[in-house]
Image (cartoon, rainbow, N blue to C red):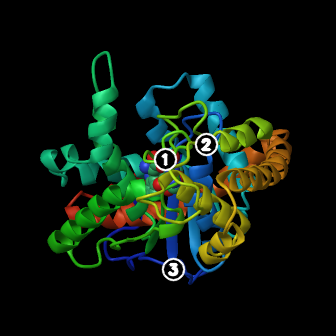
């Protein structure tokens, strides 16, 4: 039986916030295992930040497998994609000895806190989420599910359970983060100022939105993926190189960073600067007086140089699924310790009756 979140009774010291053995401030983030591969937007917008933050923060990085259920995946595909996403986390540089890597569904408190939060979320408030509006507009059949509607509430639960101070994400998650903050402030106003921690988004402007190579005003996306506009981390690197070389560029010939006048070229420059870890000024200077084709060839080479070793590492991790599962099991254990304490605190604050200790011993 898992530890029930009500296992500390009223009168016992409140188990708040940071664990005694790790005084670093907390962060939490996650990705949905909805495809066989992550794409370059996930890699640059999120993963590189996660890696950069894992030393200075007590980081919780989850596989958002419950969120992935909103697209109704085939069961076998979901399991496979969840492991593949975990392997990509590791190949990208996340270190299970420094950060807690886990699957959302392994920590029951996520769904439990989401219920409490859903009782404090306005119907209209949830309906205003642009991702919900976009995704539901594209749903055929019976239309959007209730799960798609409450998706951001589950996301708020993910974050609040870990008392996360920061949430490293791409630009597309900003509105969900605002909802999370509103919910946190609402709970604190109603049930006491230290009920939950109000998180801040961590969005690094230069890489917060990587655009589709064929449609450089739309974000590169797992769900909207245009065949030639998306760079998948686990597909043939030569195909990625081709996609870069056939990227849509802009009128004129000069290589300038100007996202409004030159969205295509600016997207390529952003990717190039991020992958080579150089400043935009430096990169623009390199291509001064040269043509779009030069930038495309240089970027294609860099992309191939990143993808080949990345894929080799992913394959090594995928070759040992038992080890992957063991890493996730260890992560879930640590995540449960933290999440269950928060859930206990919130259940207590909202007035739920603790079960008798004997019921759980
Ligand atoms: P997901 O799986 O869509 O994306 C994972 C991360 O990648 C970022 N991202 C991008 N960044 C830059 N350019 C792009 N084109 C691009 N596309 C995606 C996303 O912003 C995200 O950071 N709802 C979340 C998953 C989630 C979550 C959470 C995140 C569930 N619970 C709690 C943070 C905290 C999502 O769908 O991400």
Give SS at disc 3: loop
* Residue 165 sits above or below residue 40 on the image: below
Residue 135 x, y percent position in the rendering: 34, 34
Q: Secondary structure at mark 2?
A: loop
Q: CA distance from mark 1 to mark 2?
A: 9 Å
The relative height of residue 278 versus residue 357 in the rendered view (above or below) is: below
Q: Is residue 48 left or right of residue 354?
A: right
Write the residue at 24% across / 79% down: 193
- The answer to whether residue 226 is above or below residue 358 is above
**Other residues around mark 3 within 10 Å, as few (<14) / some (14–19) / many (≥20):** some
- Cα–Cα gap, marks 1 and 3: 36 Å
Measuring from the top left, give residue 258's x and y in whole percent.
47, 64
Which numbered disc, 1 or 2, marks the residue that appears first in the sequence? 1
Sequence-wise, the earlier of marks 2 and 3 is 3
Q: What residue would you read off at disc 2?
A: 247
Q: Residue at x 72, y 38 (%)?
A: 242
Q: Mark 3 highlights which residue?
A: 25
Q: Decide: marks 1, 2 in contact (CB < 8 A)?
A: yes
User: Which numbered marker is on residue 216?
Assistant: 1
Q: Residue at x 39, y 46 (%)?
A: 111
Residue 131: quadrant of the picture: top left
């Amino acid at each position: 039986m898992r530890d029930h979140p009500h296992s500390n009774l009223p009168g016992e010291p409140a188990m708040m916030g940071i664990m005694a053995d790790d005084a670093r401030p907390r962060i939490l983030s996650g990705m949905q295992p909805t495809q066989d591969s992550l794409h370059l937007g996930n890699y640059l917008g999120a993963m590189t930040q996660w890696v950069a933050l894992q030393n200075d923060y007590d980081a919780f990085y989850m596989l958002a497998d419950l969120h992935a259920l909103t697209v109704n995946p085939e069961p076998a595909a979901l399991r496979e994609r969840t492991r593949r996403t975990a392997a990509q986390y590791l190949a990208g540089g996340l270190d299970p000895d420094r950060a807690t890597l886990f699957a959302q569904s392994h920590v029951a408190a996520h769904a439990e806190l989401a219920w409490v939060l859903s009782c404090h979320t306005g119907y209209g408030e949830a309906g205003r989420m642009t991702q919900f509006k976009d995704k539901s507009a594209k749903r055929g059949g019976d239309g959007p599910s209730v799960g798609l509607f409450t998706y951001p509430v589950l996301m708020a639960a993910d974050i609040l359970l870990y008392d996360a101070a920061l949430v490293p994400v791409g630009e597309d998650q900003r509105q969900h983060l605002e909802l999370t903050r509103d919910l946190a402030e609402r709970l604190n106003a109603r049930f006491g100022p230290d009920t939950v921690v109000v998180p801040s988004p961590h969005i690094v402007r230069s890489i917060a939105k990587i655009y589709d190579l064929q449609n450089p005003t739309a974000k590169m996306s797992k769900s909207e993926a245009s065949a030639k506009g998306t760079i998948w981390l686990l597909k043939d690197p030569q195909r990625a190189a081709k996609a870069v070389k056939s990227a849509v560029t802009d009128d004129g010939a000069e290589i300038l960073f100007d996202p409004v006048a030159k969205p295509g070229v600016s997207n390529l420059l952003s990717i190039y600067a991020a992958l080579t870890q150089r400043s935009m000024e430096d990169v623009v200077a390199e291509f001064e007086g040269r043509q779009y084709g030069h930038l495309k060839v240089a970027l294609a080479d860099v992309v191939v140089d990143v993808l080949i070793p990345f894929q080799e590492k992913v394959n090594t991790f995928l070759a040992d699924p038992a080890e992957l599962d063991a890493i996730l099991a260890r992560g879930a254990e640590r995540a449960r310790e933290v999440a269950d304490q928060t859930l206990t605190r919130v259940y207590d604050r909202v007035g739920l009756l603790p079960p008798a200790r004997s019921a759980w011993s």
